[in-house]
Image: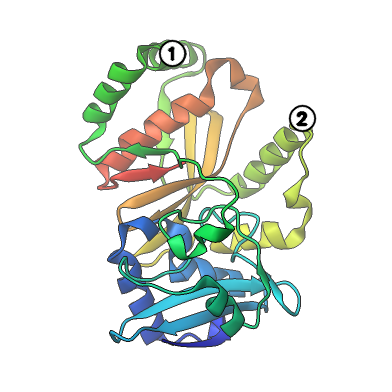
Amino acid sequence: MKIYTLPAQDLTAADQAHWSQVQAANSTIANPSFCPEFTLAATEIHNDIEVAVLEFENAQRGYFPYQRTSGSTAIPVGYPLSEMNGLIAGSDATWNSVELLKACGLKRWKFDHLVADQTSFAPHFHVLDESPYIDVSDGFDAYLEFLGGHSKSVLRTWRKKAGKLEKQCGPLRFTLNDTSPQLFETLIDWKRARIALQGYADIFQDPKVVDFLACITGTSTPDFSCMLSTLYAGDHLVALSVVMKCRDVASVWIPTFSYDHSKHSPGLLFHIELARTCAENGITRIDL
């Protein structure tokens, strides 16, 4: 196997097209974070994004994007906002993680959401856990039936909260791709207020984090899109989130809600309406 590296912005159109083909053929890397568009958006903000290209003996190739933070240390592209980390390669590809890092000139790669199927990295796992998602492959009604069979209280809460919110503020209206002005600023303001309330470190203090999010939001190609999705009750914005989509997989990214309407569980209502809309638009899985 041959491995070489290059700056991400030097990827050719043919490289990007092949990357997309490799990703499309492997369901374990279907999350939008693995799209070439995600990595290329990061190059608009950072000048230290690199890609290792792996050439396997069967003439197949793989791609390992990373951001070099120092001479021999790297993090996943988009960190700390990256949803999933790992190598973009065929499901039958094999490689040695130590040799990969060595070829990149790295001694350390810090990951936190690595795909567990990539067992070449298994010696370096610290915690193995399930990643939650919503399955709407059989349609929205089938999803509601699944919820009813596993947690009737969730359905009761959804219907009760939705009814009360509509009575107080007006009918619910969900928009998958809302291009209204000032929504991005509202998202950041609400998210930072929540972070302050919870006492967490505010990642949005870093201008490059906000710049990357602003840069990728609105991106749209045949395989990838990044949108602002909203839920209104009448004229009241009650919840919104950045939602990325890659082919038939969506990912809820940076969700937040109005605390003036928190008693109505706007987060729950948002996710239910998102599931309904995604199912109507051919999306089969929503990563959470």
* In the image: residue 84, left or right of residue 283: right
Residue 44 shows in this picture: no
Who comes first in sequence, dot 2 or dot 1?
1
Say which residue label 1 marks. Answer: 157
What residue is drawn where x is 51% and y is 12%? 168
Secondary element under disc 2, as helix, strand or loop, is: helix
Say which residue label 2 marks. Answer: 197
Instruction: Say which amino acid is labelled 2.
Output: Leu
Where is 86 relative to 166, above or below? below
Assign the N terminus to one quadrant of the image.
Answer: bottom left
Q: Horizontal and vertical percent for residue 89?
A: 38, 71
Cα distance in 3D space between marks 2 and 1: 25 Å
Q: Horizontal and vertical percent for residue 147?
A: 32, 22
Query: Of 34 and 44, which appears nearest the observer?
Result: 34
What residue is drawn where x is 25% and y is 47%? 282
Where is 286 relative to 245, above or below? above
Instruction: Say which amino acid is labelled 1.
Output: Thr
* In the image: residue 161, left or right of residue 112: left
